[in-house]
Image (spheres, rainbow, N blue to C red):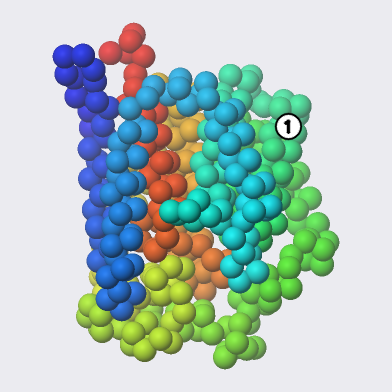
Amino acid sequence: MKKKLVFKNFSIYFDQYLFISITLLSVIGLFFLYSASQGDLNTIIKQSIFVGLGLVLMFALSQPDPDFYKLFSGLFILIAFTLLIATMIFGKEINGAKRWLNLGFFSLQTSEIIKIALPIFLASYLYNKPLPISLKHTFITLFLIILTFYLVYSQPDLGTGLVVFMAGIYILFLAGLSWRFILSSFGLIILSLPFLWNNFLQPFQRQRILTFIDPSQDPFGSSWNITQSKIAIGSGGMSGKGYQEGSQAHLNFLPEAETDFIFAVIAEEFGFIGVCLLMSIFIFILIRCIYLAFNARDRFCRLTIGGLSLVFASTLFINLGMVVGILPVVGMPMPFISKGGSSLLSFYIAFGIIISMATHKKLMQK
């Protein structure tokens, strides 16, 4: 049920299903993170601050009318591009990657901002274009998508770059891209794979793909992460080993247990039953978003809800895929569960905008 709480001088726009489910997921995430971090209270306190701030942001961003986002979409993406370029110049380098901009009190991963700004801008650009989308508008959109992807990939951050790329493609597809163009582009990408392999991917990225194809080739090196992840997931069985009883994480066999591989910790400690319960919350959120998209007031709102929802779904799918070994390891957090402020806040922002798109109706529809 979409609710508009009316007071004397103003209205509050609110979707109880998304608010409750996301709040529940956030609290569960803190519970899991406590175990994955081996009881590190500093980590939990910091993450709790981000959760509280995120819930406030989600509520605040759900209040403006969708026309506000449509009007300022150009400014949003300009700010996002400026932050990306500033990161390339002034960013803090960690393990050879410049992905974070030091703001003093907080290190911002600027690619998380562009993956929200890009779908909104493309939705505002394409919502009133005649169907099917013309080649002119298609190529303009593709140029912007590829430019954005390249800036994120250059950090280097292939995982977030892929999500940004898919975010743009989702909007283009939902806006009415012709199937002939889609199939032709897919064929061109297949033919270009040898060139992309030799000239586009970094050596460590090629190694990750080779490890994905044959994890046994380097079990104590590049294959270590995925091997330990599979052991953790498999050892959880039906009901798990119990909270904080997972050997892979607590004996430090499983790397990145707080971030990329937290799902393996959950599977080991709570088993198949716990995983199913967690996935049911994610699935409920996605189903709710699909419902809201179909019932949005206009094409701009439908495109924005659809695009942001698919960004959320893609991030979840990539994280699960790499943890269970059906996708190469690219470094992707689990939404609302993994440690990390920038990623966490980006999803609260995205769902605040989704709720705005879903709950505001035109006067003639009231």
Question: In the picture, which quadrant includes the N terminus?
Answer: top left
- Residue 294, image x and y in percent? 40, 30
Q: Is residue 4 left or right of residue 334?
A: left
Query: What residue lies at 59% left-to-right and 32% top-to-bottom?
Result: 122
Crowd around label 1: few <14 · some 14–19 · many ≥20 (10 Å): few
At horizontal 76% and vertical 44% (from top left) the residue drawn is 184
Tally of numbered discs: 1
Q: Nearer the viewer, residue 102 or 170?
A: 102
In the displayed structure, 59 sits above or below 216; it is above
Indicate the position of residue 183 as horizontal and vertical percent values. 71, 44
Q: Is residue 323 visible?
A: yes
The image quadrant where one finds the C terminus is: top left
Q: Residue at the top extreme?
A: 364
- Vertical order, 120 against 113 (above or below): above
Q: Which residue is drawn at 57% across and 89% down?
A: 219
User: Is 68 placed above or below 173 here?
Assistant: above
Location of residue 55 in the rendering, given as x and y in whole percent from the top left corner: 30, 44
The image shows residue 114, relative to residue 305, as above or below, that is below
**Residue shown at the point (27%, 70%) measured from the top left:** 41
**273 sits left or right of 166 in the view:** left
Tag 1 secondary structure = helix
Q: Mark 1 points at which residue?
A: 140
Residue type (three-letter) at the residue carrying disc 1: Ile
> Could one spot residue 280 in this view of the protein?
no
